[in-house]
Amino acid sequence: MLEALIAGERDPAVLADFAMTRMRVKIPELRPALEGGFSAHRALLRTVLDHIDHLSAAIGKLEAQAEAEVAPFSQAIDLLCTIPGIGPGHGVGDPRRDRPGYDPLSRCGAPGLLGGAVPGQPRVGRGT
């Protein structure tokens, strides 16, 4: 939708059709919201979107480098992920997350949400 705005599209019906996922059910509400001027913000938005693309590419390169660096320790990472409270976001993270079919909840993606004890966090649920 933002790319279409930058490219010069101004028809609210056309712009609203770019809505994805949960916003698709709100297309009738989007059309009036998309009416009006936009030209003054065009250059700024293009700059912001280009910067986001640049940062996303840099993050991808860093993640690939980190994955290569920790690859020799894959077995140790798997063992560490069995400890409650340890997982992605702790230390180097989980280099498997970008692989096809990776399910972050299948291993140690969210032990606190799945009932594991998380050090330093109060217990919630039975017996609290």
Image (spheres, rainbow, N blue to C red):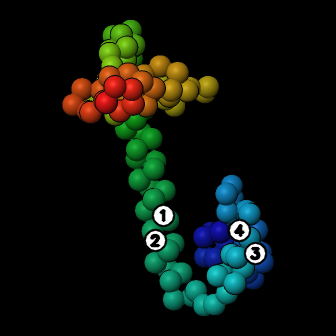
Q: Earlier in the sequence, mark 4 or mark 2?
A: 4
Q: Looking at the picture, which amino acid does disc 2 mark?
A: Thr
- Image spot of residue 12 (x, y percent): 73, 81
Q: Disc 4 marks which residue?
A: 26
Q: Looking at the picture, which amino acid does disc 3 mark?
A: Pro
Marks 4 & 3, CB-CB < 8 Å contact: yes
Residue neighbourhood size for the residue with mark 2, other residues' Cα within 10 Å, grouped as few (<14), some (14–19), many (≥20): few
Which label was assigned to residue 50?
1
Residue 14 image-quadrant placement: bottom right
Residue 74, placed above or below residue 127: above
Q: Disc 3 marks which residue?
A: 28
Which label was assigned to residue 47?
2
Marks 2 & 1, CB-CB < 8 Å contact: yes
Tell me the SS state at disc 3.
helix
- Image spot of residue 85 (x, y percent): 31, 25
Q: CA distance from mark 3 to mark 1?
A: 30 Å
Q: Looking at the picture, which amino acid does disc 1 mark?
A: Asp
Give me the residue at 48% from left, 64% from top: 50
